[in-house]
Image (cartoon, grey):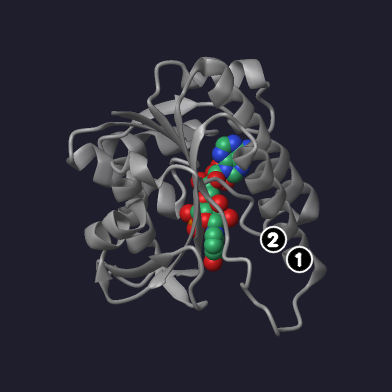
Amino acid sequence: MRVVIVGGHGKVGLRLGRLLAERGDDAVGMVRTHDQVADLKAAGVEPLLLDLVAGSVGELAAGLEGADAVVFSAGAGGRGGPQATNAIDGEGAVKVVDAAERAGVRRFLMVSVFMDAGRGRDLPETFENYVRVKRASDVHLAASALAWTILRPGTLTDEPGTGRINLGPAIAYGAVSRDDVAATLAALLAAPGTSGRVLELTEGEVPVAEAVARVGR
Ligand SMILES: NC(=O)c1ccc[n+]([C@@H]2O[C@H](COP(=O)([O-])OP(=O)(O)OC[C@H]3O[C@@H](n4cnc5c(N)ncnc54)[C@H](OP(=O)(O)O)[C@@H]3O)[C@@H](O)[C@H]2O)c1
């Protein structure tokens, strides 16, 4: 399976690329700077140099040509204020969805955000904007003709993965390691029965393969 990871050098994206390459998939990592190419190659990931913000839908579609699936795991990460969030997590994501449709890619996994993130805390408007923009991108994807899955992880950590998760349409809010997010994305790519699902993800007790098999039924 040829999978293009948008945000290929991100903390989740690079972990996912490595996992896919290890299991024999063609993993392609979209990055916007040449400096990150060597890290991708070291992980067995084919680099694709494209900037989400500067690139047009046509240019992005050309980059996605021949892919079986796209995973959107890019983001401004709070850097650059609302403008960057709007351009990357918002307009950027929408352009990639449109580009995937134009390129004839069937499967699309969106790394979204748990909508309860930070609820009850006094959050800055920038975070509120981030969640609003992520939801708008999900809405655009869900209205597309793609075989989409929207994954909404809780707060991400860099703790080592446990390989055990809680995954479902409505679960209690919590944290989850980036290792386990990547493992879940890899399992979802191999489970077409999870198309058309919005899934929340936190750390939990169920092995990743079993958790994904349960929601795919
Ligand atoms: N942090 C959390 O607790 C949390 C919770 C739930 C969901 N999420 C979501 O999880 C996803 C992955 O998170 P992460 O920790 O892996 O994020 P990350 O390490 O910040 O990775 C984001 C990637 O997006 C890339 N990117 C930004 N702008 C781009 C552009 N114009 N063109 C191409 N690539 C661009 C970045 O590349 P550069 O190195 O060039 O900037 C970076 O590699 C994000 O979508 C995030 O919104 C995060």
The answer to whether marks 2 and 1 mark residues whose Cβ atoms lie closer than 8 Å is yes
The reply, left or right, for residue 160 in relation to residue 69 is left
Q: Nearer the viewer, residue 202 or 54?
A: 202
Is 200 or 24 nearer to us in this picture? 200
* Residue displayed at 49% across by 44% down: 196
Instruction: Say which residue label 2 marks.
Output: 131
Mark 2 neighbour density, 10 Å: few (under 14) some (14–19) many (20 or more): many
Tag 2: residue type? Val
Q: Residue at x 29, y 62 (%)?
A: 211
The residue tagged with tag 2: helix, strand or loop?
A: helix
Which residue appears farthest toward the left when viewing the image? 23
Query: Residue 190: which quarter of the image?
Result: top left
Q: Is residue 13 placed above or below 31 in the rendered structure?
A: below
Residue 128 has which mark? 1
In the displayed structure image, the side of residue 42 where residue 99 appears, left or right: right
Secondary-structure class at tag 1: helix
Left or right: 83 with respect to 27? right
